[in-house]
Amino acid sequence: MSTENLTDRELDRIIEMAWEDRTTFDAIEFQFGLKEQEVIELMRREMKPSSFRMWRARVQGRATKHAAKRSFEKGSFKSSRQKHITHNKISKR
């Protein structure tokens, strides 16, 4: 898909996904057909220069943005310090 054919809503969603730490470039390509370099070009075009530089510094080399570099397959991350919940139970006063 060409970036010229994207709706404003699709552009907003791609930018949102690109900012998310755990959304890979592969996921953006799967959903919108844009390769990593096309996402970078889109971000450069759609963002203020200072915001683009901040985003690039943030994602450059970040393993979670590249599926091949991830240490986990899929699903949500759970910290080892997170409280373990054995079943869904609503605490009541």
Image (spheres, helix red, strand yellow):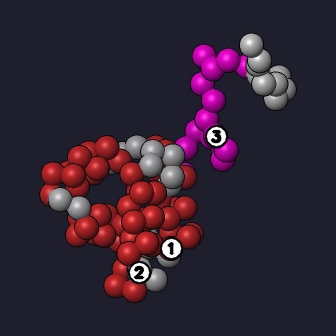
Q: Residue at x 50, y 65 (%)?
A: 28
Q: As shown in the figure, which amino acid type bears the numbered disc 3?
A: Ser
Residue 22 place in picture, x, y as percent: 51, 46
Tell me where residue 40 appears, x and y as whole percent.
31, 64
How packed is label 2: few (under 14 Cα within 10 Å), some, or many (20 or more)? few
Local secondary structure at mark 2: loop
Closest to the observer, 24 or 69: 24
Magenta stretch: helix, strand or loop mostly: loop
Could you say whether the residue bearing mark 1 is in a helix, strand or loop? helix
User: Badge 2 is on which residue?
Assistant: 6
For image coordinates 45% across by 57% down, the residue present is 17
Q: CA distance from mark 3 to mark 1?
A: 22 Å
Q: Which residues are magenta?
A: 68-84
Q: How many marks?
A: 3
Left or right of 55: which side holds 31?
right
Are circles 2 and 3 on residues that touch, CB within 8 Å? no
Image quadrant where one finds the C terminus: top right
Residue at 50% over, 69% down: 29
Q: Residue 61 lies in what quarter of the image?
A: top left
Q: Are marks 1 and 2 in contact (CB under 8 Å)?
A: yes
